[in-house]
Amino acid sequence: MCETLAVIPLGKEAEVRAILTPEPIRNRLNELGLTVGCRVRCIYAAACGDPRAYLVRGTVLAIRNRDARCIEVKTWD
């Protein structure tokens, strides 16, 4: 099942399939370790739902929902 990073539930793990953000944002996410093929886990969502925090390669990244909606992931049941 392919969905976006913005909709995976808390505690769920997924694999990044594509990063479709504008190039400067994509480059920054790549520098922080978020690359195609890596596994991420949603570990926190702000009270209003934005931003959300993800565990990526042992590092916590906070990503805005508008950017997370541009990151395609694959989840497992």
Image: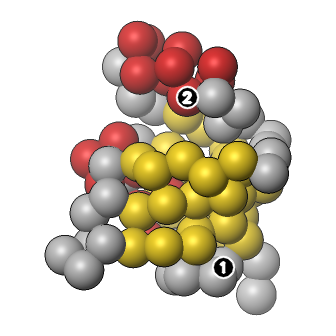
In the rendered view, would you say 30 is above or below 38?
above
Is 45 left or right of 65, judged from the image as shown? right
Which amino acid type corresponds to the residue marked 1 in the rendered image? Lys
Quadrant of residue 51 within the rendered picture: bottom left
Q: Residues within 10 Å of mark 2 (few under 14, many from 20)?
A: some
What's the mark number on residue 12?
Answer: 1
Q: Residue at x 43, y 13 (%)?
A: 23
Residue placed most toward the observer, 57 or 68: 57
In the rendered view, would you say 62 is above or below 29?
below
The image shows residue 4 at horizontal and vertical percentages of 48, 58
Q: Earlier in the sequence, mark 2 or mark 1?
A: 1
Which amino acid type corresponds to the residue marked 2 in the rendered image? Leu
Q: In this orientation, does residue 74 appear?
A: no
The image shows residue 43 at horizontal and vertical percentages of 58, 73
The image shows residue 29 at horizontal and vertical percentages of 55, 28
Q: Residue at x 41, y 48 (%)?
A: 63
The image shows residue 14 at horizontal and vertical percentages of 71, 64
Q: In this orientation, does residue 33 appear?
A: yes
